[in-house]
Amino acid sequence: MTRSLVQLGDGQEDEFNLVSALHDRLPRIDGHDPTILIHNDAVVRGVSELPKMGDVSRWGVLTIGTGLGNARITNRRRQR
């Protein structure tokens, strides 16, 4: 798939929905519809830091770029 996000909608639609646009273009896998989950960049960054943050119970992430992103993460207790 080489289409850019701009090509998924014409940019003039008030009702454009990225998840719906992707869902309509992705193939079914083993007879199942694809599951699409979109998060902001702070959530993605926070998940990438999980291996380093095992010694705290709660922590947060703030990203500043083209906009602000934030996430609050609570570590689950590890099962022994």
Image (cartoon, rainbow, N blue to C red):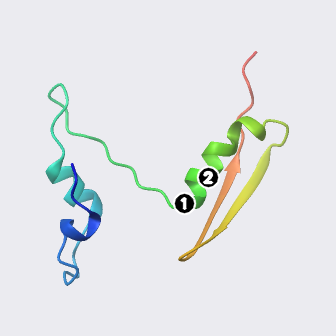
Vertical placement of residue 15 versus 50, above or below? below
Q: Residue at x 21, y 58 (%)?
A: 3
Amino acid on which the number 2 mark rests in the picture = Arg
> Dot 2: what SS?
helix
Instruction: Residue 17: give x, y in percent of width and height.
Output: 26, 67
Instruction: Residue 80: give x, y in percent of width and height.
Output: 76, 15
Residue pushed farthest right? 55
Vertical placement of residue 49 versus 16, above or below? above
Q: Are marks 1 and 2 in contact (CB under 8 Å)?
A: yes
Q: Residue at x 58, y 54 (%)?
A: 43
In this picture, residue 29 sits left or right of residue 67:
left
Q: Which mark is residue 19?
A: none
In this picture, residue 13 sits left or right of residue 50:
left
- Quarter of the image for residue 30 reads top left
Q: Residue at x 75, y 31 (%)?
A: 77
Amino acid on which the number 1 mark rests in the picture = Asp
> Dot 1: what SS?
helix
Q: Residue at x 73, y 57 (%)?
A: 60
Q: Which residue is mark 1?
A: 41
Q: CA distance from mark 1 to mark 2?
A: 6 Å
Instruction: Residue 2: give x, y in percent of width and height.
Output: 22, 53
Residue pushed farthest front? 2
* Depth order, front residue of 44/66: 66
Instruction: Residue 66: give x, y in percent of width and height.
Output: 53, 76
* Depth order, front residue of 47/3: 3
Q: Which residue is mark 2?
A: 45
How crowded pointer 1 is (Cα within 10 Å; few <14, some 14-19, many 20+) is rated as: some
